[in-house]
Amino acid sequence: MTLALQLAVAGLATGSVYALIAIGVVLIFKCSGVVNFAQGAYAMVGAYVSYVLLRTGLPAIVAVLGSMAVLAVFGTLTERLVLRPMLKAPLVAVMMVTLGLLIVSRAACLIVWGPDQIAFPKVFPEGAISAAGIFITYNYVAAGVLALVLSLGFLAFYQFTPIGLQQRCAADNTRAALAIGIHVSNQVSLAWAMSAALAGLAGTLLATLNGLSLDLAGIGMIAFPVIVVGGLSSLAGALIAGLLLGMLQSFTDGLLTPALEEFLREHTSIYSVGALQQVVPYALLVLMLLFRPQGLFGRRGTERV
Amino acid sequence: MSARQLAITVGVAVLMGVLGLALGRYAAYLVNAVAIAALGALSLNLIIGYCGQISFAQGALLGVGAYTAGNLSNAGLDGAVAILGGGLLGAAVSALVGLPAMRLRGLYFAIATLAAQAILEYLFKILDPLTNGVSGLVITPPTILGFPMNSDQSLVVPSLVILVLAWLAVSRLMRTDLGRAFLVVRESEIVAKGMGIDVSHAKMQAFLIGGFIAGVAGALAGYANRLASPEAFTLDLSADYIAMIIIGGLGTWPGPLIGAAFVVLLPEAIQRVGEAAGISDILSALRELAFGLLIILFLIFEPRGLTALLSRLRPRGIGAAPHGSVGAPGESGQPQEGGSR
C-alpha cells in the first residue's frame, strides 16, 4: 500500500510535467492544425538554455523565466518562418517538417553541448519529505507542483481572459474570428510562443529530475499518447491524461515490471522486459484509437480533412 | 508500365551495377545503400504517396525483415529463401500496423503508426532469443542461390535485381484496378466508396505489398551491415524514408530512387568534405544538422520534390508533373486534384 502511494505520487509529479508538454501540442493543434513533433525539441532547448543561464549565476527564477522567453521567440520564429509557408502543403509534409525541426535542434544541441549527460545545477533545495510512510524528494514535489499549478493556470488563462477568448475564437472558427476583428495570424503566433515556452519550462523541470541530455527530445514524444488519450482538441483532457499516463508509467515501472519479469524468468528464456514503462503509453494509445478515437474528452469529428 | 519506363529502370540498374562493380569496395557499398534505400522508399511511396496512408513505422518494418532474414540464414537457409521470409513477415507485420487504418484516417492513423514503431522497437530489444536484445543480431554472410555474399561487391547484383523486379512490379501494379483504387482512396475515401471501391481492402493490399517490399529491403540491409540491432531501425530511420519520398516527389514514379540517392549520398558527401576539412569530431552532428535543414528547406520551397524540380527544368522530362498541381501528382504524371491532406 505504501509502495502504491509512493508510486502514485512520483507518477503524478512526472505526469504533470508531461501534461505541460502535451498542453502545448494541443494548443498548437487547435490553433493551426499542425501536429508538432518538435515539442520535445522545445523541451530540450529550454532545458539547455536554462542550464546556460543558471551557470551565469542568475537566480533560478530569473533563469527559468529567461529560458521561457527565449523559447517563446523560438516558437514564434518556427511558426513564422517554417510553418506559415507550408499552409497549403499536404499533411505528411507538415508533420515531416516538424520532425525536421526536431532533427536540427538535436543536432545543434549536440554540436554545442556534446552527447554526454550533464549534471543540472541545483534549482530546488536538497532533502525530502517523508509522510504517511512515503518518501519524496523536494525536486519531485517542486517539479510536480510547479507543473500542475502552471497547467491549471494556463487553462484558466485560456478560459477566462480576453486573450484566451481570442485564442479560442481563432482556433474554433478562423473566418468568424477574422470577421469580428481578431488578428488571427498573431493569435496563431502567440499560441506557438506560449506552447514553446511551456515546453521549455517542462524540459527544465525534467532536467532537474533526470539530468540534462539530448534524450529530453525523445521524452517529448510521450506527448502523443497523452494527447490521444485526452482527446486531440481538449486542453483539460491533455492535463488529466498527462497525470494518468505519468501514474501508469510509474506503476508499470514499480509493480508490473518486477511481477512480469519474475513470471517470464520462470516460463521463458526472456530475462528482462526492458523499459516496459516507455511502451505502455503507446499500447494505450493504440487501444484508445481503436475503441474511442476522439479520446476521453475530445469531440467527434475534430479531424482536419 | 510503359516500354520507356522499362528501359529506364533496366538502364539505371545496369549503370548502378557497372559503377558498383568497377569502382571498388566503397562504390559497391554506396550502390547497395542506395538500392536498399530505394526499395524501402518504393514501398513507403506506395503506402503514403499512392494510397495516402501516412506511416511512421517504416523503419521498424525494415527491422522485421532484417531480423527475420538474419535468423533464417543464420539457421543455414539459402539467402534467397531468407529474403523471401523477411518479405513475408514484413507483409504480415505491416498488415497489423495498417489494421487501425480500417477505422482511422489521416492524422489519427499517422499517430497510430507512431505507436506501432515504438512498440516494435521495444520488441526488438526484449525478444532476446530472436533478436539478441540491445547488442543486436550478428548475421553471418549468407549464400544467395549458391553465391557467397561475403563482400560489398557480391551483394550488388542481388540488391539491384530485386530493386528492378520490385520497381517493375509496382509500376505494373499502378496500371491495374487496384493501383487506380489506391489513388482514389488517397484523394477521397468518400468518392472511392461511391465508386464501389472496397476502401478497407485497398488499404490492406497497400500495406501487404508495401510491407513485403519493406521486409525485403530490411533483409538486404541486414546482409549489407551483417548486423541487425535496435538502434538501426528507430523512428529516425522512418523519418529518413519519409524524407526520401518527399524529397524525391510524393507519389511520383522516379521519386523513390531520386530521393533515396539524395538522402544516402548527401551525408556521405558531407562526411568526405568534413574529413578533408579536418573537423571529423563534430561531423556526425553536422551531418544531421545539414540533413534536417535540407528537409526543412525542401519542404518549404519545393514540397513536390526533386522530380518536380527536374521536370520544371525540362518540361517533358520523366514523370513530368504539370505546374500548379498542389500535392502529389499521379503515377504517370496526370494532374490529380488536391493532395493527400
Image (cartoon, rainbow, N blue to C red):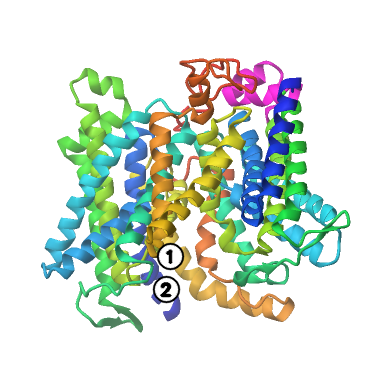
Amino acid type of the residue that numbered disc 1 sits on in the rendered structure: Met
Residue at the spot 46% in from the left edge and 46% down from the top edge: A228
Instruction: Of the two numbered discs 1 and 2 on the same chain, state the one appearing first in sequence.
Output: 2
| Residue B254 inside the magenta-drawn segment | no
Q: Quadrant of residue B73?
A: bottom right
Q: Are marks 1 and 2 on the same chain?
A: yes
SS state under label 2? helix
- Residue topped by disc 2: A7
The residue carrying pointer 1 sits among few (fewer than 14), some (14 to 19) or many (20 or more) residues within 10 Å by Cα, namely many
The residue carrying pointer 2 sits among few (fewer than 14), some (14 to 19) or many (20 or more) residues within 10 Å by Cα, namely many
Image position of A246 with respect to B210: above or below: below
Q: Are marks 1 and 2 in contact (CB under 8 Å)?
A: yes
Image position of B147 with respect to A127: above or below: above
Kindly identify which numbered label has been placed on residue A247. Answer: 1
The chain that hosts pointer 2 is: A
- Alpha carbon distance from label 1 to label 2: 7 Å
Amino acid type of the residue that numbered disc 2 sits on in the rendered structure: Leu
Give residue B254's position: percent from left, percent from top: 62, 30
Give residue B341's position: percent from left, percent from top: 49, 28
Residue B146 shows in this picture:
yes
Give residue B232's position: percent from left, percent from top: 58, 59
Decide which of B22, A17 is in the foreground and name it.
B22
Magenta extent = B175-199
